[in-house]
Amino acid sequence: MIEFQQVCRSYGDKVAVENLNLRVGGGELYALLGHNGAGKTTAIKVLVGLIRPGSGTVSVGGYDLVTQTREATALIGYVPDQPFLYDKLSGREFLQFIGRMYGMDAGQVGRAIDREIRRFELFDFVDELTETYSHGMKQRMVFASALLHSPRVLVVDEPMLGLDPHSIRLVKDLLRSEVAHGLCVFMSTHTLAAAEEIANRVGIMGHGRLLFDGSLDELRERFPIEKKSLEAMYLALTERDGEADRH
Amino acid sequence: MEKQTGIEKFHCGRLTPLMNELALQSQLNRVADWEIGTRGLPSEDREAQLFWRLRYQITRTQLRQLLTTSRLRTFLVVGLSLFFWAGLFLLFYEGFKFIVDNIAPAGAPYHAQTVQFVFHLFFASLNVMLVLSSGIILYTGLYKSPETVRLLTLPTRPERIVLYKFQEAVFYSSWGFFLLASPLMIAYGIVAGAPAIYYFLLPPLIISFVYVPSGVGAICCMLVIHKLPKLRRIIVAGIALAVIAFVAPLIWQTINSPQSKLFGAEWFHETLHRFRFTEEEWLPSTWLTNGLLEAARPAAAVGTSMVADLPLVQSLLYLALLVSNALFLHVLTVWAAKRWFRQSYANLAARHIRRRQVRQALADRVFSLLLSPFPPPLRLLLIKDWRLLRRDPVQWSQFLIFFGLLGLYFLNVDRFNNPHSDINYVTWINMVSFLNLAVVGLILSTFTTRFIYPMISLEGHCFWIIGLLPIERDTILWSKFWFASLGSWVPCSLLVLLSDVMLQVPMLVIGVHQLTCVLLCLGLASIAVGFGAMMPNFRETSPSKIAAGFGGTLNLVLSALYIMVVVVLTALPCHFYLLADNGPFGTSFVNPQYLKVWLVVGTGAAVVVGASATIFPLRRGLRAFRQLEFI
């Protein structure tokens, strides 16, 4: 479903992503981990079409993100780390706009909105202006808008940021249930516990390179003495990379 | 036992049936809509409709909110705009009447030449302003807005995003044009006795004209950003050279042009010659000027039977020229958007931001030395605000541009070598010197509203830093007050001194002006700081939006009133005093015994008003700031 082929991207002299090769299929939840500045956000921005790769290709559902941008983005639902909503629209009006932009007709949009209202418990505030929402309410609305058109790929940047425990539970359950029903989720996060709980594949990035790509079990096999927690394995791997980089 | 992954847990049945059911619905939709991505996306027309609907919904909500929650602010803004419009209309009306009464009646060649000159100059200036403002507004809307990020991740055509933002840029860059141009055109129509068709042609002429420079600005904006990474040095050097090539001759001409008698024939010809470039045939402002003047010309005044020579036909031809160019630029904008926008956005998003190592600059050390009389906590806060100002080019560049233009204008005001015994000349000089003072004050008031008023609101975001410092809250507010007063007093007093020196006003007037300057700076700083503390807006992060709110508008209005009162109080007695000294009617007009008393009373009253405007807002602001809760 998602395919990065030898993707490189630099910011001037600084290499943000170096030779990234990655395939994520339907029904998979891929968690991309890494320190700040490791290249996660760049990888996500390339995946949703905000940044173009310097070299290499990225495709979604077989569509190239650079040459077939519309077709590719039509398959993606994106949840950014900073939620954007139109202040002067109600949540329902915002969802209607998004649904229509994906080519859904009035009936489809209406049914999809009802579904997302139930899923994210938006009943109390969906008809209020979004400028009155708290961060958690905004994040739930953004999730609803990302899933409204039943995308084949969900790209999520830091999904747990600023959410209360109830909303975190909601998001985790949502991601797991959607993945079980065939959705491909590509998630960037610093919340290792969440990644450990819900991901079935993890990628660890450091200095723009993908240091590890595989399941948690494969990671545990690689680090048998690290007490088997993702946090310990992650730190061991990234520290090793840091030392190698210094040398 | 090994940990289970999420999917394994899911299959163990830990999820709620609702989540399961909804995920199943999504899955079924995914299968059913498999081909939506390629075939079901909205057509170009449908996409345009959706964006218009979005704009309609947003505008409707904004208007509703304005009329329900911000009624006072709305009426204040609308009322002031109407007042401003009416003032401009009267000014233009009297100006055109002056031309009719003193130069030539409508239809005469001299009249046409004079009006043409005014129109050419006026619209050519606005032409440049529209190119720049639409380019800058589009840049902010397209490349710096979180909305664009959202829209780019939807399957939206890039040209639709550009057009959507371009419409905003046209609107925001041209409302000032409408406010300035409409009273001018209507006043001219009335004075020239224009036929009804003139008024019908005004809207299409204005709208089509506005679209042309805005389109040029939009295309330049996208082109510059598109080519910036590769041609950064060439673009910067090109712009710098163009500015130097344009500005240097103007400054040279201004300073070195021979002094001619004010309003004399030579002065008039010199002025006409200097601005001849505004009459170039390829300028859209020329098409608009010609279109307007032709529409205003009565058909009976033309002694021709040729249809093509009829004023209405000529005006329609100019309108067609404007419309066709506007449409061409629309097509060109769409083409540029398709080709450049996504790529240029990606280039800008992926540009390398150099990390700046900052050390204590010489300017900081000098500033710190100058502030040594202040207590250490106040000094530290002042140095912090100074550094924020120094490192933010958006702020100091605006100061530089406005005060630079004023300086250039002041350098130009001594171009008249009339005899100093001429009463008209003395009256003129004195009036201009006080008008200059008022202009400096008014520009200063826009700066205090734009930069000083939002300071407390912006401090709210990092109040956890200064709020927890072992200092009195009052110190924070005092630091803002001193920063604003001292920071504005130095450039303002220098500018006013420059104006006075160039106009060769008497020492008495220089003294009065310098005192007025101090009063204005203290009062305006206090109003901005006091109202900023009384009406903070901690939800907004943009200083321009804070300044555009109700508090900011009130601050601007009160500041303008304060300036007018202080300037009139000091100017009038001075004016009569000088007239009595120089005028041919001497002391017959006013009793010389009371002239000095008037001078003292006027200045004293200004000092009282200044002291009140300094003390009361600041005191109220301090009280409000002590009780403020930062949430």
Image (cartoon, rainbow, N blue to C red):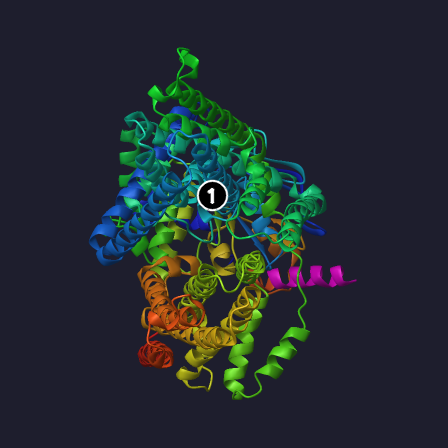
Residue drawn where x is 33% and y is 60% of the image? B553
**Majority SS type along the magenta span:** helix
Q: In percent of the image, x 44 and y 72: which residue is there?
A: B581
Q: Is residue B45 above or below residue A22?
A: above
Q: Is residue A241 magenta?
A: yes
Q: Does B183 appear in magenta?
A: no
Residue B631 location (% of width, % of height): 35, 70
Q: In front: B369, or B226?
A: B369
Q: Which quarter of the figure has residue B503?
A: bottom right
Secondary structure, mark 1, is helix
Q: Position of residue B340 (x, y in %)?
A: 58, 34
Q: Quadrant of residue B184?
A: top left
Left or right of B556 on screen, residue B255: right
| Residue A40 visible in the picture | yes
Query: Mark 1, residues whose alpha carbon is within 10 Å: few (<14), some, or many (≥20)?
Result: some
Instruction: Tell me where the magenta segment starts and ends, as one range.
Output: A234-247
In the depicted structure, whether residue A18 falls above or below residue B631: above
- Quarter of image, res B472: bottom left
Q: Report x, y in % for residue B450.
A: 43, 62
Of A6 and B376, which appears nearest the observer?
B376
Q: Residue under mark 1: which chain is it in? A: B
B15 or A165: nearer the viewer: A165
Q: How many marks?
A: 1
Query: Of B360 and B12, which appears nearest the observer?
Result: B360
Q: What residue is disc 1 on?
A: B148
Q: Which amino acid is tagged 1? A: Thr
Q: Is residue A123 above or below residue B124?
A: below
